[in-house]
Image (cartoon, rainbow, N blue to C red):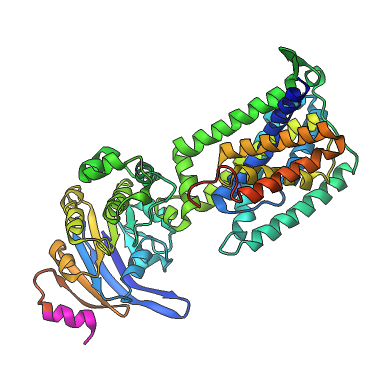
Amino acid sequence: MDWINTVLQGVLLGGLYAMFAVGLSLIFGVMRLVNIAHGDFIVLASYLALVVVSHFGLSPLASLAVVVPIMFILGYVLQRVLLNRTLGNDILPPLLVTFGLSIILQNGLMQVFSADSQKLSQGELEVASVSMGSLSVGVMPLIVFCTAVVIIGGLQLLFYKSSIGRAFRGTSDDQHTAQLMGINNARIFGIAMALAMAVVSIAAVFLSIRTSFDPTVGPARLLYGFEAVIIGGLGSLWGTLAGGVILGVAQAVGAKIDPGWQILAGHLVFLAILVVRPRGLFPRSVD
Amino acid sequence: MLTIKNLSARYGDFQALFDISLELQQGETVAIIGSNGAGKSTFLRSLAGLIRNAPDAIVFNGAAVGDKPANQILSSGIALVPEGRRLFPSLSVEENLRIGAYRKRPGNWSLERIYELFPVLEKLRKRPGTALSGGQQQMVAIGRALMSNPQLLLCDEISLGLAPTTIKDIYAALPSIKADGTTVMLVEQDINQALAVSDRFYCFQEGRVSLTGKSGEVGMDQIKTAYFGV
């Protein structure tokens, strides 16, 4: 029963990793941009939530109503003003610019908020649990996992059933021909980044309730995100959820064997999958 | 409807078009013929906004659109069927058609009418666009352009690499397309095909118009001279 509990905790944690990853996957899928600053945007959103919580006295979950729209707009503006200018045949400029953004964000946050660890408190909900047979499952991890499923399901619908989703996929296939369909690539990229940032801010608030954060933890978050994307297969949204779950379970099982093994076990499983399935478990059929 | 005045285009140091001027009336079908490298495709790409020009080099319905990007050109009513079809590989046939209506203008074209025009596509609609034969892909590419309800349809080498019977099937759709008053400009390497379906033609040679006239009224010898430049 202990092991079942461990795996279940890992699965639920995987939902959080999938939320880190889905924004990365979306941006890479639509515009072939690898956002090195993704993890730092998670931290930025956490601090934004912290400010909203402490100034307006909202609970962290309620602060999402403010944080998500702000990050959505920030994502759109960032893409239109800065990142669109870096896109082209060369993949190096966007890497360098987002790497620079990562450094700017870390140092900016350090300057404003100091290096002290912060945490958001959701009160009793954090310790609430429900019993499932002999298992006891935290309510918060369940909420996180269900949110991840809803977000990924929603993005899946958006991508495969809507006009803008077709525009995303068409632009991803062939930017020049997409323009001939009346698609404004710059705007499509802006919307993709805005969506990614909206998802990032939800993941950020959940993460800040779960564990403490400081201005320098971004790159570690980015790493989990990358691993989940690559395990799942680039460009596949449900694959990203699977990738997050596999990573979460590996970490939980690793920690069960020995607490020092938690992070290592995740990386080892990632490497093992990379060796066996270099394109991930559910790669998109067309690249 | 369309007035082109002194249109020039260059790729870096290489000038592909020199001062092209021509006019198009509503409802006409005009063919652009010429050998490889004569500048035909560059000309269509300029009209579609993939190559930017001086604003008043292209005047469409009274508006100077020469410097507009491709996505705005489409909204103004010019759609291009690009050379090589260029369907979106991750979209199904039906999605490829629907994406053509992303910024559609008001008009009569719909999925149903495209399937009437090219009945073979209806049972293939769930397939990936690029899993079709060349001729079927060309039908999707034409349908996709029509979904935006263009006033002017530009077709770049739609018969290239296709079997003669397939070419016949595709050109059989032309009368239905024109029936709505759509103006059509065709780029073709196949002179006979181009002259058979067009009202007028322009022959390009090394980036300049070497001959123009009514299709069927100009002798083949004269056209061949203009075509090859000998």
Depth check: B1 or B200 in front?
A: B200
Give me the residue at 58% from left, 54% from top: A32
Give me the residue at 56% from left, 64% from top: A89
Vertical placement of residue B31 versus A24, above or below: below
Magenta region includes residue A235: no
Give me the residue at 43% from left, 59% from top: B68
Horizontal and vertical percent position of residue A168: 50, 46
Vertical placement of residue B217 versus B169, above or below: below
Depth check: B75 or A121 in front?
A: A121
Magenta region includes residue B225: yes
- Is A22 placed left or right of B133 in the picture? right
Indicate the quadrant where residue A243 lies: top right
Q: Which residues are magenta?
A: B221-230
Indicate the quadrant where residue A60 lies: top right
- Is B13 placed left or right of A205 in the picture? left
Horizontal and vertical percent position of residue A113: 87, 42
Give me the residue at 48% from left, 55% from top: A175
Horizontal and vertical percent position of residue A81: 63, 54
Vertical placement of residue A153 versus A28, above or below: above
- Residue B109: tell me if it is visible: no
Horizontal and vertical percent position of residue A231: 64, 44
Q: Magenta region's main secondary structure?
A: helix
- Is B100 placed left or right of A110 in the picture? left
Vertical placement of residue A4 versus B117, above or below: above
